[in-house]
Amino acid sequence: MFGESNYDLVLSFLRNRGLDPSRPAYVALDAIQYAPNVPSIVKYLYDASQAAGQPSIKFILTGSSSF
Protein backbone atom coordinates (compact mmCIF):
# COMPACT_ATOMS: atom_id res chain seq x y z
CA MET A 1 0.00 0.00 0.00
CA PHE A 2 2.85 2.40 0.71
CA GLY A 3 3.81 2.28 -2.96
CA GLU A 4 0.62 4.22 -3.73
CA SER A 5 1.06 7.71 -5.20
CA ASN A 6 -2.30 8.95 -3.85
CA TYR A 7 -1.52 9.55 -0.19
CA ASP A 8 -5.18 9.95 0.79
CA LEU A 9 -5.71 6.33 -0.28
CA VAL A 10 -2.95 5.30 2.13
CA LEU A 11 -4.74 7.15 4.93
CA SER A 12 -8.03 5.46 3.99
CA PHE A 13 -6.25 2.09 4.00
CA LEU A 14 -4.97 2.73 7.53
CA ARG A 15 -8.39 3.86 8.74
CA ASN A 16 -9.96 0.70 7.30
CA ARG A 17 -7.44 -1.30 9.32
CA GLY A 18 -8.38 0.37 12.60
CA LEU A 19 -6.45 3.64 12.71
CA ASP A 20 -8.53 6.12 14.69
CA PRO A 21 -7.38 9.69 13.91
CA SER A 22 -8.84 10.96 17.19
CA ARG A 23 -6.36 8.88 19.18
CA PRO A 24 -2.56 8.61 19.13
CA ALA A 25 -1.40 5.92 16.74
CA TYR A 26 1.77 3.99 15.99
CA VAL A 27 2.52 2.53 12.57
CA ALA A 28 5.52 0.21 12.11
CA LEU A 29 6.93 -0.37 8.64
CA ASP A 30 9.76 -2.73 7.78
CA ALA A 31 11.87 -2.91 4.62
CA ILE A 32 11.05 0.66 3.62
CA GLN A 33 13.83 0.57 1.02
CA TYR A 34 11.43 -1.34 -1.25
CA ALA A 35 8.83 1.46 -1.35
CA PRO A 36 10.46 4.68 -2.51
CA ASN A 37 7.41 6.82 -1.60
CA VAL A 38 7.54 5.93 2.10
CA PRO A 39 9.37 9.08 3.33
CA SER A 40 6.95 11.36 1.48
CA ILE A 41 3.89 9.41 2.61
CA VAL A 42 5.05 9.37 6.24
CA LYS A 43 5.61 13.14 6.19
CA TYR A 44 2.21 13.72 4.59
CA LEU A 45 0.40 11.55 7.15
CA TYR A 46 2.26 13.08 10.09
CA ASP A 47 1.68 16.66 8.87
CA ALA A 48 -1.99 15.97 8.13
CA SER A 49 -2.58 14.67 11.65
CA GLN A 50 -0.81 17.70 13.15
CA ALA A 51 -2.73 20.20 10.98
CA ALA A 52 -6.07 18.67 11.92
CA GLY A 53 -5.29 19.21 15.60
CA GLN A 54 -5.46 15.48 16.18
CA PRO A 55 -2.99 13.38 18.12
CA SER A 56 -0.14 12.67 15.79
CA ILE A 57 0.68 9.41 14.10
CA LYS A 58 4.07 8.06 15.18
CA PHE A 59 6.06 5.91 12.79
CA ILE A 60 8.62 3.19 13.42
CA LEU A 61 10.59 2.68 10.22
CA THR A 62 13.20 0.01 9.57
CA GLY A 63 15.13 -1.02 6.53
CA SER A 64 18.26 -2.69 5.34
CA SER A 65 21.32 -0.48 5.55
CA SER A 66 23.10 -2.74 3.07
CA PHE A 67 20.49 -2.19 0.32
Image (cartoon, helix red, strand yellow):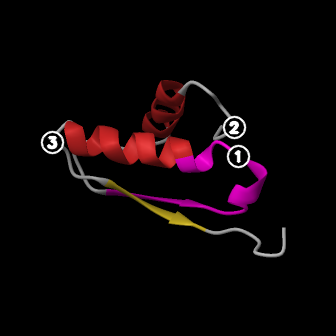
Is 48 situated above or below 32?
above
Residue 30, how many percent across, how many down? 67, 63
**Residues at marks 3 and 2, CA–CA distance in whole angstroms:** 27 Å
Q: Which segment is the magenta one?
A: 25-39
Q: Amino acid at mark 1?
A: Pro
C-beta proximity under 8 Å, tags 3 and 2: no
Q: Residue furthest right?
A: 67
Q: Residue at x 32, y 38 (%)?
A: 48
Q: Which mark is residue 13?
A: none
Q: Residues within 10 Å of mark 1 (few under 14, many from 20)?
A: few
Residue that mark 3 sits on: 53
Q: Is residue 42 visible?
A: yes
Front position among marks 2 and 1: 1
Q: Residues within 10 Å of mark 2 (few under 14, many from 20)?
A: some
Residue that mark 1 sits on: 36
Q: Amino acid at mark 2?
A: Gly
Residue 66, how many percent across, how many down? 83, 75
Q: Secondary structure at mark 2?
A: loop
